[in-house]
Image (cartoon, rainbow, N blue to C red):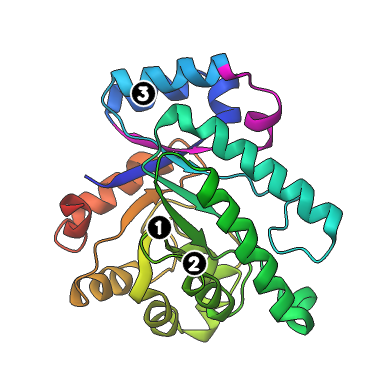
Amino acid sequence: MSLFVNLPLSFAAKEPRYIDMLIEQGVSPELGMDTYAVQDLDMHWHTKTAARFADAGLSCGIHLPFFDLAPGSLNDHILEATRATLLKAIEISQAYKPTHFVGHPNYEAGQHNLYYGDWLSRSHETWSQLLKQDQSNAQLFLENTFELTPKPLVDLVQSLPANRVGHCFDVGHWHSFAKGYQNNDLLEWLNAFSPRLGHLHLHDNDGSGDQHLALGTGTIPLLELFDYIQANELSPSATLEPHTEDAFPASIEYLEAHSMSVCFLAEG
């Protein structure tokens, strides 16, 4: 099954029971290569942790760092620091033999609209450098966060190799940050992303914020999302992103209750 669950490596280092939990349940992780993991965890820890997942027969995805980073920044110093951080994350990630990477382009309309071409060019170069650095040949999925429309992500993804780069549609970010709960424009986003939709981030909220609730406990039209994927014969992988331990089993129960709607996950 092409289903993952998020696990920030900072959490895993401070609370090793999270690693044990995933191994015991046979669930593949999407590992958050966060700031702590890049700056403070040595390579021995990463190699040892990667071996534990590999010995358990679990694949690993990697969520690249995003805190304080700006992959398309017009400030040369910020851009240089961002690229250095992301390249180091790619280097460390090789120990995990990743199935995929997820990255945040971090387009902000208020800052970048007037300099759209420059942002796009610099962001393109950032992600191109990462693809060259990666030896695993894993897929890179670029994720919507605070973007208000799909256009900047579509333009960026289309500028990068189709055999390596696709979209990660985070339905919770669409519903809250992009005001999807008000605009009711799920179809617009899916139509824009669908030619290169490769991955989903799944969690729920009520539209007022990025709450990362269990699936089915908010107001996101999840079944509309799943129906679209089925109707268009798409086969994205997916990552559950619960922010509480209780939300994980509840989300699994939701998927099992709607197994016919999410059979694309079993086919991946």
**Image quarter (top left, top right, bottom left or bottom right) of the N terminus:** top left
**What's under tag 3, amino acid-wise?**
Phe
Q: Residues within 10 Å of mark 1 (few under 14, many from 20)?
A: some
Secondary structure at numbered mark 3? helix
Query: Which residue occupies 60% across, 20% down?
Result: 14
Residue corresponding to mark 3: 53
Residue at 38% in and 17% down: 52
Gap between marks 2 and 1 measured at Cα: 8 Å
Horizontal side of 142 relative to 261 (left or right) equals: right
Q: Is residue 267 visible?
A: yes
Q: For mark 2, what is the residue?
A: 160
On whether residue 32 falls in the magenta region, the answer is yes
Badge 1 amino acid:
Arg
Marks 2 and 1 close (CB-CB < 8 Å): yes
Residue linked to disc 1 = 164
Q: Secondary structure at mark 1?
A: loop
Where disc 2 sits, the SS reads loop
Q: Is residue 199 above or below residue 132?
A: below
Distance between the alpha carbons at the discs numbered 2 and 3: 31 Å
Q: Nearer the viewer, residue 95 or 193?
A: 95
